[in-house]
Image: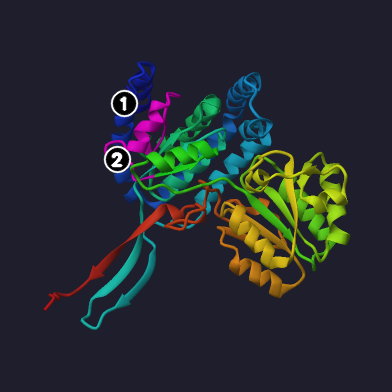
């Protein structure tokens, strides 16, 4: 009986504690093997997985259609349904991401720095895997592939706990990933998908699975992230909500500003890099505010604004204090007029979530101040906030956007899933 079948059997029995104990122990064993796996073997697994995803596209689409139908029946928000929905283009994107991750340099064993001491010792700092990584996510079946592949490439074992709303989709994708893992001769437990929707499984992961879990990455709504941060007994890569801002400076080109604002808000409203607040410099409000607001409304976006924004367009609804803190993940945006870049920076510091912020301006000095003083994981000049994505950064994919300041910040890719150790070479030295 295979490892997967044993776990499914225990899942059917609803013995969650035993199930998670077995998953954790299997992951630890796999992590030991993965840490020593050669690059060619890991890459072969990822390339075989990409082929399997393409070969199994019909099965993945069928599973996803069932998940989406249930989500619609349950009254799930459109933004979450968008995250959940797969089509042939998105599945091809999953396969390409696997290939792109395979093409990345292997971080494991890379020397980060090295130096010699006066006593003849040669010291080097070398990248090593973190070990076993748990990923808890909602409504994002593509994370099954992205997270699993990034962990494998960086020599880590992965324990994936997807949301119940995407269970069928995640299982179909995981089956394809597992084909690649087995074909390359890697441990079957290298990438495990928790085979139960029982919430007790999350609780067991937060306890650390008997010391077998080294880090947890939550990807989901505010309540999920808050629970993980409050209850986890292992380190957490914080991924808070994306209250992202676009600041249109007084020296911004109107056409550029319009294109960036529309893309940042509306390209995909359900992603964490979608802009939720538009700040407009009072120096250009007379010429820029009404056209920007009008363009958003014309595209079906609800605008909630301050008094100046309401005067610029009668269709603007009054914004409340809560609006400045809100991650809408929908076709809604809050608009405020500010007195220059200093007030824009202050607004972001008060209401933002340290995720992603953009400035649109032709003034390099103003842009430099914004980029230096805004304390967020990602800051952009004259570009859409929707570039907040590991794939767009050349990382192949990402596990999430870390908004904390320890270990990893911004897109979490293969390098961020490693730590390091010091390797010291001597020729008989002893310390006096």
Rounded to the nearest angstrom, the CA distance separating label 2 from label 1 is 14 Å
Q: Is residue 324 left or right of residue 218?
A: right
**10 Å neighbourhood of mark 2: few (<14), some, or many (≥20)?**
many
The answer to whether 422 is drawn above or below residue 246 in the figure is: below
- Residue 107, position as x, y percentages in the image: 42, 57
Coloring scheme of the render?
rainbow
Can residue 134 be seen in this snapshot? no
- For residue 11, above or below residue 380: above
State which region is magenta: 189-215
Residue occupying image coordinates x 76% and y 55%: 260
Please state which of residues 161 and 52 is positioned toward the viewer in this rendering.
Answer: 161
Q: How many marks?
A: 2
- Judging by the rendered image, the residue that carries numbered circle 1 is 17
* Residue to which mark 2 is pinned: 212
As drawn, which residue projects farthest toward the top?
13
Density class for disc 1 (Cα within 10 Å; few <14, some 14-19, many ≥20) is some
Q: Residue at x 42, y 43 (%)?
A: 229
């Amino acid at each position: 009986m295979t490892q997967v079948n044993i776990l499914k059997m225990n899942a059917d029995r609803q013995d969650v504690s035993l199930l998670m104990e077995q998953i954790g122990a299997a992951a630890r064993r796999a992590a030991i093997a993965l840490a020593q796996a050669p690059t060619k073997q890991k890459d072969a697994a990822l390339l075989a997985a990409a082929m399997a995803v393409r070969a199994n596209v019909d099965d993945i689409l069928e599973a996803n259609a069932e998940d989406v139908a249930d989500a619609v029946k349950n009254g799930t928000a459109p933004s979450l349904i968008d995250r959940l929905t797969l089509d042939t283009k998105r599945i091809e994107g999953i396969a390409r991401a696997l290939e792109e991750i395979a093409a990345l340099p292997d971080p494991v064993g890379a020397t980060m720095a090295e130096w010699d001491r006066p006593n003849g010792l040669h010291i080097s700092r070398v990248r090593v895997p973190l070990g076993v990584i748990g990923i808890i996510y909602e409504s994002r079946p593509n994370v099954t592939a992205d997270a699993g592949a990034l962990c494998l490439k960086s020599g880590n074992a992965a324990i994936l706990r997807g949301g119940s709303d995407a269970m069928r989709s995640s299982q179909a994708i995981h089956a394809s990933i597992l084909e690649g893992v087995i074909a390359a001769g890697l441990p079957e437990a290298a990438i495990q998908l928790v085979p139960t929707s029982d919430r007790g499984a999350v609780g067991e992961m937060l306890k650390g699975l008997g010391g077998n879990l080294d880090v947890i990455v939550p990807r989901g709504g505010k309540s999920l992230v808050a629970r993980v941060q409050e209850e986890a007994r292992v380190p957490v890569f914080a991924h808070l909500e994306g209250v992202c801002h676009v600041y249109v400076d007084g020296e911004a080109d109107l056409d550029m500003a319009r294109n960036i604002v529309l893309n940042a808000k509306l390209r995909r409203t359900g992603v964490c890099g979608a802009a939720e607040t538009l700040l407009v410099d009072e120096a250009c409000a007379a010429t820029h505010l009404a056209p920007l607001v009008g363009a958003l409304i014309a595209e079906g976006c609800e605008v909630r604004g301050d008094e100046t924004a309401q005067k610029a367009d009668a269709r603007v609804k009054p914004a409340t204090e809560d609006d400045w803190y809100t991650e809408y993940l929908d076709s809604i945006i809050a608009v405020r007029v500010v007195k220059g870049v200093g007030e824009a920076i202050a607004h972001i510091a008060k209401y933002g979530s340290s995720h992603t912020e953009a400035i649109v301006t032709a003034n390099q000095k103003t842009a430099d101040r914004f980029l230096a003083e805004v304390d967020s994981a990602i800051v952009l000049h004259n570009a859409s906030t929707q570039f907040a994505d590991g794939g767009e950064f050349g990382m192949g994919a990402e596990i999430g956007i870390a908004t904390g300041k320890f270990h990893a910040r911004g897109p979490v890719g293969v390098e961020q899933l490693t730590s390091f150790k010091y390797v010291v070479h001597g020729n008989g030295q002893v310390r006096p």
